[in-house]
Amino acid sequence: MTATSGTMRADRRTKNLVKRLRPGDIAVIHHADLDATAARALVECRPAAVVNAVRSISGRYPNRGPEILLAAGIPVLDEAGEALFESALAEEGTEAVLSDGCLRLASGASAEGVPLTLQRVAAQLEEARQNLSRELDAFARNTLHYLAAEKGLLLDPLEVPELDTAIRGRHVLIVVRGEGYKEDLRAIVPYLDDVRPVLMAVDGGADALLEMGLKPHLIVGDMDSVSDRALACGAEIVVHGYAGGDRAIPGLERVRRLGLQAKVFHAAGTSEDIAMVLADEKGASVIVAVGAHYGLEDFLDKGRGGMASTFLVRLRLGSKLVDARGIGRLWAARNRPATRELVLLGVAALFPVVVVAASSPWIRTLVSTFWLSLRSTFGVR
């Protein structure tokens, strides 16, 4: 690992760190099982290096975060330790040097870690794949355990807040900052232009829409990963409250500190789940999901030990819920130039012209004269 220096930025939550990380900074994180979404967010910030206080791949399941960082050419130092991380928090904004597997802070504090390479990561991922069946077993048991507690999402009437945004009978696009969300958004631009759906962002999904020049109609969630700029963009805000309604709601407090108004939706499940339920309760005809979580690794990346609420919500929505990738392929096919059909149409149109020309003595004489002229000009016998 070659020597690297830069301004150090540290945070226990990677999604908060990327908001203030600048190109050339050294990012110090505390992120076990670094997921693909967080890694891509780090890559976009173009740091000089990433130092993780804990193991980026614990072996529970094959998470792709470290591989994404290394493939982007960003050095990764693993397992730098808790003491170093606490010092980094206290010294944020100062210069740090990463050299020979050791991070040295301006105060003189230092710690050695494990420099990651693509070969080392590949070996760790292979080992993690061997544990995946055990992780799946625990995940399934946890899902079944919580199904009874969260069945209200499917069966019970919910106290849904009144909205100013008209949804009934319209398509609703729900944007979650999950794996591949940017590619999915770009793929459905023709759909957005044609249908103009209601844009419902889940937390940081609002920033994703704004980056594409699209203003969300609604922002739904805990408000822990959305920027102040997005909250102040004029969208209607719905804060995810706890199901019992008897606990403080940090997201609501944050919105009020910004001088903004918000409604509260008390329901079990994730913010992604309640966004879908809200769209359904308000009469959406189709719900298109961007960046939503579907597979085991998606949920493990999010730190979810089960998917009871998500299973119930998907069961509730049925065929109304459509993945954005399917919509993207459908609209691409719909808008693709029909080259083959146009050629066949042209041939069909020319056919009667050719028949008429072949049966006309005048046309045959004209063609013969033209041919004789060519032979005379080029000396063809």
Image: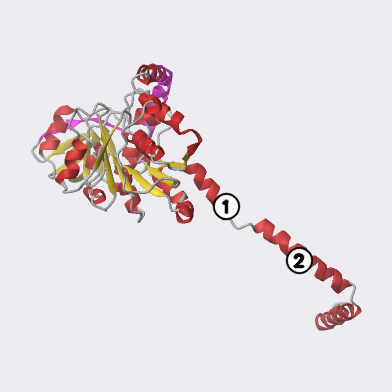
Instruction: Report the residue at 32% width, 39% height from top.
Output: 39
Residue extending furthest left?
A: 107
Mark count = 2
Residue 238 x, y percent position in the rendering? 28, 41
Q: Is residue 191 left or right of residue 100?
A: right
Of residue 250 and residue 320, the one placed in the foreground of this image is: 320
Q: Residues within 10 Å of mark 1 (few under 14, many from 20)?
A: few
Give the SS element for disc 1: helix
Q: Secondary structure at mark 2?
A: helix
Looking at marks 1 and 2 on the same chain, the residue that comes earlier in the sequence is marked by 1
Q: Are marks 1 and 2 in contact (CB under 8 Å)?
A: no
Where on the picture, by quarter, is residue 15? top left
Residue 114 within the magenta-colored segment of the rendering: yes
Where residue 286 appears, as percent x and y from the top left, is 47, 42
Which amino acid type corresponds to the residue marked 2 in the rendered image? Ala
- Indicate whether residue 110 is drawn in magenta: yes
Q: Is residue 349 rendered to the left or right of residue 146?
A: right
Up/down of 126 relative to 2, above or below: above
Q: Mark 2 highlights which residue?
A: 349
Question: Vertical placement of 381 versus 76: above or below?
Answer: below
User: What whole-number distance in Å separates the C-alpha atoms at marks 1 and 2?
Assistant: 24 Å
Q: Position of residue 106 (x, y in %)?
A: 10, 41
Q: Give the quadrant of the C terminus.
A: bottom right
Q: Amino acid at mark 1?
A: Arg
Q: Quadrant of the rendered structure where residue 133 is?
A: top left
Q: Circle 1 sits on which residue?
A: 334
- Can the viewer see residue 154? yes
Magenta region, residue range: 109-137
Q: Residues within 10 Å of mark 2 (few under 14, many from 20)?
A: few
Quadrant location of the N terminus in the rendered image: top left
The residue nearer to you, when weighing 226 against 93, is: 226
